[in-house]
Every structure is written in C-alpha cells, then in structure tokens.
Amino acid sequence: MSDVIQLRVILADDHITVRHGLKLLINGEHDMTVVGEASDGAAAVKLALECRPDVVVMDVSMPGVNGLVAARMLKKSLPDLAVVMLTRHADDAYLQELLRAGASGYVLKQSPPTELLQAIRTTAATGKYVDSTLIPRMTARFVGEKPSGASATVSEREAEVLRLIACGYSNKEIASQLDLSVKTVEAHKANAMRKLELSGRIDIVKYAILQGWLRDA
C-alpha cells in the first residue's frame, strides 16, 4: 500500500457534519486523502490555489459564493483541476449548468458512498463522471427526443470533436489538440449537430453519455 499514490482531495460544504462524514469516507480509502476543508465557495477556491489538490468535492448550495460560481472560478484558475459537484438535485437544469461551469463530476447526495468514490477516481484520471442513477433517464430522454438523430452517422473526426466538447474543452483547445483550425472545428461541430439533430451543449453531453464516451474520457 505504501507505493499507492494518494489522490489529494478538498471538501467544500457549509455543513460541518457532512464534511466530517465525507472525510471519514475518503480517508478510509487507501488511494485518497482529504487535505483541506472549506465552508463556502470562496474559501474553497482560495484553499485550492494554496493546496493544489487533485480533486475538489463541492456542494452546490453554499452561502456567499455557491458551488456553481466557485466551479467557474476554479476552472479558470486551475483548468486541470477535477471538480466533483455534490447535490440533491437530479434535474437536467442543474446538470447542464454545472457542466457548463466546468464541473468534472456530478454526484447525488442520496446515492451510495461508492458513487462519490468512483467519481473522485474517474475525474482525477482526467475523465468525466455523471451519477449512474441519472444515466438511464438521460439516455431514455435523449433517445425519445432524437429518434432519427440517434441512428445518424457522423465521421470519426466529427465524433472526436463532439467527445471533446462533451468533456468541456473549448473550440480553441480542441483545435490545438487535433491540430486543426478553429473554423474547421466549428464546421465539424455544426455538421455533427445537424446530422444528429442536436440543439445545444446539453444534447451533446447526453449523446456522449449514450455512447459511453464520458466514462472513458
């Protein structure tokens, strides 16, 4: 066990009892440890800049600077940092906004503890994680809304662009990764969205989940 690299985690929640429970859970794992705690978003951002953790586990609803705003701030200051949002809200509106803010993971508070531990490990490995209880509903809704698009065919490059968009990369970042111009990336995105009848970013994320891309990103 001594050779295992431990993931450094910061907890941000305004309820000290919740933080205590999460800390016991995380510190009980052989490959992760809590290196700091914060009670609001502003403190979480400050702590993350000081500690440079691998993952921040953050409640959405906090006084002052909430989790959504803090996620945007962290994404801007520490783009490689994984941010796992913890919330009791299971609706698409929350998921959409948090993904746009740069969250790497989305876990429901009412889910089993193993869900959070898996989210920490997956996002720390530069992946994305959406609570497993949400995937069947999101997939069913996507298929129901886009029956013709679900069977459409996109090129390998178009699929690659969509996957990177779903993972939170900007057009400029995707262009750099794929050695393309930004205009070419935009063209691939537009073509893929037209073929699949996708209307926006949340549809791209739903399609990515349907394809299993976010688990392996």
Image (tube, rainbow, N blue to C red):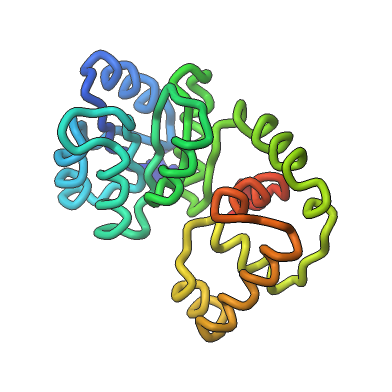
Figure check: 180 above or below 73: below
Residue 54 at what x, y percent from top left? 35, 48
204 and 55: which is toward the camera = 204
Residue 193 percent across, percent down from the top left? 67, 63
From what the image shows, is residue 137 above or below residue 209? above
Q: Position of residue 41 (x, y in %)?
A: 21, 38
**Which residue sits at x=70%, y=42%?**
142
**41 w.r.t. 74: above or below:** above
User: Would you say 78 lies left or right of 42 here?
Assistant: right
State the residue at coordinates (26%, 32%).
12
| Snapshot quadrant of residue 20 | top left
Where, quadrant-wise, is the C terminus in this rendering?
bottom right
Q: Indicate the quadrant containing the N terminus: top left, top right, bottom left or bottom right.
A: top left
Residue 92's x, y, as percent? 53, 35
Point 65% across, 75% down: residue: 188
Which of the 4 image quarters holds residue 80?
bottom left
Q: Residue at x 63, y 46 (%)?
A: 206
